[in-house]
Image (tube, helix red, strand yellow):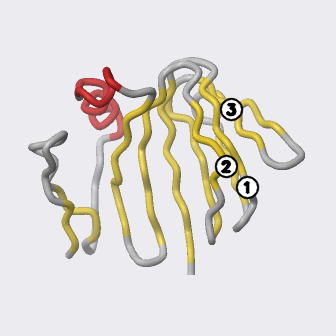
Amino acid sequence: MKTNDATYNRPEGARVIDASYVTADIKDVIKQLKDENAWEKNDRNGITLFKTPGTTVVLTCLHEEAVIDNISVDGLVMIEVREGKVNVTTEGDAFELCENKVVFIHENVPHSIYALEKSAILMTSFTG
């Protein structure tokens, strides 16, 4: 079992991120992220929900016009929009994704995410 420790910014953030099973209530986690100081201070706030040597799942809330630029992962990536609307661009294409839409991106394909409105995205990467 692997846990994530509490931090100064998330004092009640100690949680299991790898075990035989890990559960998360996405709506509750989105609310938690938007209630934290980091949401007020920054253009985004995120949390790792699950992490193993080959898989990482991160939930990120984005303010309108927030940009996650030039991402490149040594594995497959899945980006799912849980709330709002984002634009995902690759070297030659752009995809507008709204709630419950998903895009899958192969390894080492550079991509960027631009929030067209306040959004929550679930990003999963599969490596190794």
Residue pushed farthest right? 92
Q: Residue at x 60, y 47 (%)?
A: 79
How many residues crowd mark 2 within 10 Å: few (<14), some (14–19), many (20+)? some
* Mark-to-mark CA distance, 2 and 1: 6 Å
Q: Residue at x 67, y 49 (%)?
A: 70
Residue with the mark numbered 1: 110
Q: Above or below — where is 12 with respect to 44? A: below
Residue 48 located left or right of residue 15: right
Left or right: 21 in relation to 69 = left
> Gap in Å between the C-alphas at discs 3 and 2?
18 Å
Residue 127: percent from left, percent from top? 56, 74
**Residue displayed at 19% across by 66% down:** 3
41 sits to left or right of 54: left
Looking at the picture, which amino acid does disc 1 mark?
A: Pro
Disc number placed over residue 70 in the picture, else none: 2
Assign a secondary structure to mark 2.
strand
* Mark 3 or mark 2, whichever is nearer to me: 2
Q: Residues within 10 Å of mark 3 (few under 14, many from 20)?
A: many
Upstream in sequence: badge 2 or badge 1: 2
Tell me the quadrant of the picture where the C terminus can be found. Answer: bottom right
Above or below for 3 versus 98: below
- Residue type at mark 2 is Asn
Q: At label 3, which amino acid type do we have?
A: Leu
Residue hosting label 3: 97
Cβ atoms under marks 3 and 2 closer than 8 Å: no
Query: Which numbered marker is on residue 57?
Result: none
73 on left or right of 63: right
Task: Label 3, secondary structure: give it.
Answer: strand
Image location (x, y in percent) of residue 78: 61, 54
Q: Nearer the viewer, residue 43 or 78?
A: 43
Labels 3 and 1 touching (C-beta < 8 A): no
